Amino acid sequence: MIAGCRLRLTDWQSQLLSSLLLLSSLIRPALGCLSDGRYVMGTVLEITLCVSDPGAGQRTMDALFTAATRLDALFTTFSPDSPVSRLNARAGRGAEAVPPEVADILLLSLSYWQLTDRTFDVTVGPLMAMWRQAAATHILPSPAIVQQARSRVGSEKVKLSHDERVTLTRPGMTIDLGGIGKGYALDRLTHLLKAQGLSHALLDFGQSSIWALGTPPDVKGWRLLIRQPKGETVGLMTLQDQALSVSGSLGQSFEVNGARYGHVIDPRSGEPLQRDLLACVIAPSAAQAEALSKALLILGEDEGLALLQRLPEVEGLLVEANGQRWMTPGWAQTITFAPREEFQKE
């Protein structure tokens, strides 16, 4: 009888627990998603935030845009009064005090410069200015002019001190954070969300730098269309708790004497890329994904994918304009990816 009583009591407890769990699910506030997009860092930052309290969600949304706008003001080179512009103006003339965020992103950038065999380099500004001039005049720079610009490029010429002072050792050097700033900003915004206990959001900078946090309600992940710069669809991707960077070599290009040149420059040679490639990189942080996607474009399918395979939790896909694809061995296992020809059959 005692054993029987214990059995009946266990059954009763089980039924009570099931009822309580059902009641809890009924009274728990359902998640609703808020979306907004604002112009930040030269493109549109789109945020989708899934929360149970719309009012609190909107306040969080506003705080995220405020934080992104602040970082934009710190990193831009379009304002002569920004910390990065002041640093560039002091190149070759001693150290410049910078805000903690600028020191932090520069330290991170120098580590990625070393990691990527010097293919990701935030000191590439002189080369970018030279090739912008070539695009405007349709006149290619001479080898001597290219070499002169290259002499002012190289992250080994950037010196950081522990008191957040930075020295650009060569006159004419310029820092350009356009290849990492968006990813760094998304990492900071994601940190703010996690600090508030929020775990369901999609942060998207111009469909090129993305943080997928958690999942939308009742869905396995955030579904994203991956497109070539000209709009052609590459595939459909589903992300969960992953950062993604998508970079194209000829997204902004110009033509001289029948040859097309892209906006991504190999700092080692000083030359812009001419192959039409799209690089997609998944990484633990959006800043790392951005740096590695640029490196993958420059290094190509052999060296580039070999680099990614050496890094933990990093996967990549490289697509040529003719449709040929190369990917790391873990690409298909890490994310859900359907090439265009597969999902268009559905």
Image: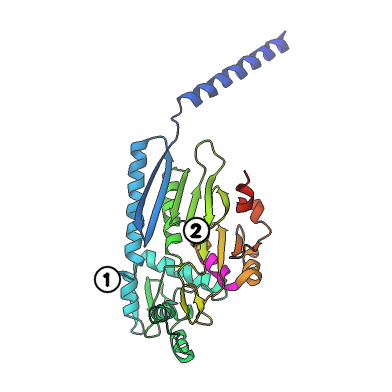
Q: Amino acid at mark 2?
A: Gly
* Residue occupying the point 45% across, 67% down: 179
- In the rendered structure, find residue 231 and report the number of the disc placed on it: 2
Q: Is residue 77 rendered to the left or right of residue 118?
A: left
Residue 147 x/y as whole percent? 47, 88
- Label 2: how many Cα within 10 Å (few below 14, some 14–19, many 20+): few
Label 1, on which residue? 81
Q: Is residue 226 depicted above or below 274 in this figure?
A: above
**Chain part drawn in magenta:** 291-299
Q: With 95 as the anchor, is 242 left or right in this view?
A: right
Classify 165 as above or below 29: below
Does residue 266 appear in the picture of this structure?
A: no
What is the three-letter code of the residue carrying label 1? Asp
Q: CA distance from mark 2 to mark 1?
A: 36 Å
In-front residue for pair 153/35: 35
Does 284 sit above or below residue 216? below
The label shown at residue 224 is none
Residue 328 percent across, percent down from the top left: 66, 61
| Residue 122 within the segment the image draws in magenta | no
Residue 68 horizontal/vertical position (percent): 36, 56
Of mark 2 and mark 1, the one earlier in the sequence is 1
- Residue at figure coordinates x 52%, y 50% from the top left: 224
User: Is label 1 in a helix, a strand or a loop?
Assistant: loop
The rendered magenta stretch, by its main secondary structure, is classed as helix
Whole-percent x and y of residue 214?
51, 44
Q: Secondary structure at mark 2?
A: loop
Q: Quadrant of residue 198?
A: top left
Q: In front: 8, or 219?
A: 219
Q: Given the current orientation, which residue lies at the most extreme bottom position? A: 144
